[in-house]
Structures are given as C-alpha cells and as structure tokens.
Amino acid sequence: MAIINKVGGLAVFFSLAFFAQGALAAGVPIGDPVAGKDKAALCEGCHGGMGNSESSDFPRLAGQYAGYIVKQVKDFQSTLRANNETMAGIAAGVTDMQDLKDIASYFSQQKMAKEPLTKVDSKKASRGEDIFLKGKPEKDLYACVNCHGERGKGKAPNVPTFPVIGGQHRDYLVKNLKDFQSGARVNDPAMMMGDIAKKMSAEDIEAVAEYLSSQLP
C-alpha cells in the first residue's frame, strides 16, 4: 500500500492530532450498548434501524466509533459544529452524558448494511481509490488512508479522532467535504480536513466519495 509520509506541514498536524486526540479519546468511558438500544429509538428515526439510515441526508452510524459519535454530538451542542440544523436541535436535547455514551456504544456495535444507497460508478470509484491511497503529491494533498485506515475503516476504536468513513453514503460524504472546503464545518482537529478539502477539486471529492461508498461489508 502506498503511504505518503510527508506532504508539506500536514504530517506535523497529523502527528500532533493523532497522539493528543488519541490519548484524550482513550479516557472516554465506554457506554452500555444494551441500555443504549432503547435510548437510541429516537435517533433511528433519521439514522435508520441499527444505525443504517436510508437517506443520504443522515449518515450511517452502524459501526462508527463510539468516541467519534460522542464528540460530534458535543460539538453540535457547543455549536463548534453547525452544518446541520436538525442535528443541532436533537443534540441540544441530550442532557445526560451517560445516555449519549450508551447510545454511541450501541451504534458502534451494529453491523453496517451491505448495499450502498446509490449504484457505484466503478470508473469513478477506481479514480477515488487512487486518491484515497496515494493522495496527490503535486497538489500537496495528503492520502486519506493515513488517517482513516484501509478501506476507510478507521485506525482503532480508542483513536476516534479519525472516523470510519468506508461504507458511508456517497452524497453525505460529498456534502461534508464541501462543507469542510467552504468553512461551513470546522470541528476537525487542527483544521486538517479543511486544509485537505481545499486542495480537492469537485471531481476529486466526488471520486473519493464514490470509492468510499462502495466499501461495505
């Protein structure tokens, strides 16, 4: 597998964020997935049964790191993340941290659906895979695999700074990459995703999202 060791100053950001955020995440108590099943009932209205949403407006949460889910809800609560008004309203109603950890733990243990919402364009996905694995050195574009792991399946549960994105809805990924690009979403560590997205063309974004949407069980 091709790994880009250094691309400009981003390798420094990656190292600092990985270790600092990883150490923080390791200290987050794990919730109770059994208790979380009933508590997640309201969430499933948008995110689907067992976290497999049937609309690209809402991300799949099945198999996502619990620590990442907790962070995103807290970011919506603090308005650090403000690119989805519906989720901001729901997050505001989560007042018990243990409930949040239980819900996140429940979704983290669910299996991702085996089919994408949209038919995969194999040619576009192949181009996206190349960018995902190798980046674009000529544009100082860091390879996605370095943070998000093989097939976008993440690094490790105790390092949820970099979420599981393999198997996520194509259109959801496109929207969020564009939000990072425009500054509508700014809750990434050290502004890494914003920096990366700004170096991606519309075609790059669509290709990477196409590839990742195909990375299902």
Image (cartoon, rainbow, N blue to C red):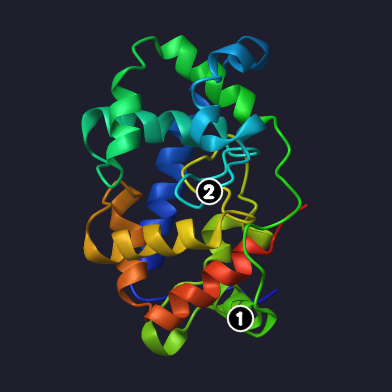
Q: Is residue 186 left or right of residue 98?
A: left
Q: Could you say which quadrant of the image residue 181 lies in? A: bottom left
Query: In percent of the image, x 23 and y 39: which residue is there?
Result: 80
Tag 1: Cα neighbours inside 10 Å, few (<14), some, or many (≥20)?
A: some
Q: Could you say which quadrant of the image residue 184 lies in? A: bottom left
Report the amino acid beneath label 1.
Answer: Asp
Residue closer to the observer: 216 or 26: 216
Residue closer to the observer: 118 or 33: 118
Q: What secondary structure is found at the residue carrying circle 2? A: loop
Residue 196, horizontal then vertical, whole percent: 36, 69
| Above/below status of 34 relative to 76 | above
Q: Is residue 209 left or right of residue 211?
A: left
Query: In percent of the image, x 62 and y 70: which residue is there?
Result: 211
Report the disc number at residue 130: 1
Asked whether the viewer can see residue 194, the reply is no
| Above/below status of 128 relative to 20 | below
- For this orientation, the residue located farthest to the bottom is 138
Report the amino acid beneath label 2.
Answer: Ser
